Amino acid sequence: MITVISGTNRLNSEALHFANYYFNLLSAKSDEPVKLLALENIPHDWFHPDMYEKGAQSPSLAALQDEYILPAKKFVFVIPEYNGGLPGVLKLFLDACSIREYKASFFGKKAALVGVASGRAGNLRGIEHLIGILHHVGTVVLPKILPISSIEKLLDENGTITDIGTLKAIEKQADAFLAF
């Protein structure tokens, strides 16, 4: 199974447009099941002082981990730039999932990274930070990262990606990821 993760809890984010596109592309190109986890839709009852205790994981987080993280063999992370890095909710989510079934959640799995930003660097700093985190938990990262810049120029009013070069770059990364 492949899980595509839109890495922000901001409602109606541009990152979700890119994650949806990637989800649809992988669903069309792969025989593997593909799921989309949009962090904007998850409950946040798992964020509490005891969340790092072995038996204190909330049922809602355990359900997300059981559906999207544990059965996945591969992940695509679409991460918007927040203050020169990745969104805190993504880091918090990864930390919370690492309390229960640490090794089964991330170790030996594969990931592709897509950074999206309104600036010129396509969230390269956030991508690099996430690479470090994923390496720490034993996830193998596809070397072909994809920073996407100036995203407000790439989407139409409906959130559809209209830039042909960007669509080609996403498809090229997706093909490499499926072969990875």
Image (cartoon, grey):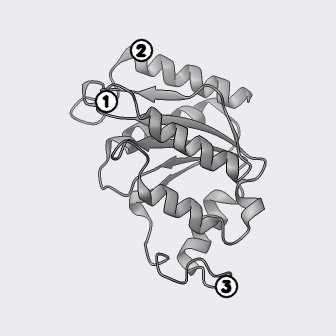
The three-letter code of the residue at mark 2 reads Gly
- Residue at x 54% of width, y 22% of height: 171
Q: Nearer the viewer, mark 1 or mark 2?
A: 1
Using the rendered view, name the quadrant where residue 150 is placed: top left
Q: Is residue 26 visible to us here?
A: yes
- Residue at x 55% of width, y 78% of height: 51
Using the rendered view, name the quadrant where residue 110 is placed: top right
> Where residue 17 sits in the image (x, y, percent)?
37, 39
Q: Is residue 1 visible to us here?
A: no
Label 2 neighbour load within 10 Å: few <14, some 14-19, many 20+: few
> Where residue 15 sits in the image (x, y, percent)?
38, 42
Q: CA distance from mark 3 to mark 1?
A: 41 Å
Examine the rendered structure and indicate whether residue 132 appears above or below residue 30: below
- Residue at x 74% of width, y 46% of height: 109
The three-letter code of the residue at mark 1 reads Ile
Q: Which residue is mark 3?
A: 55
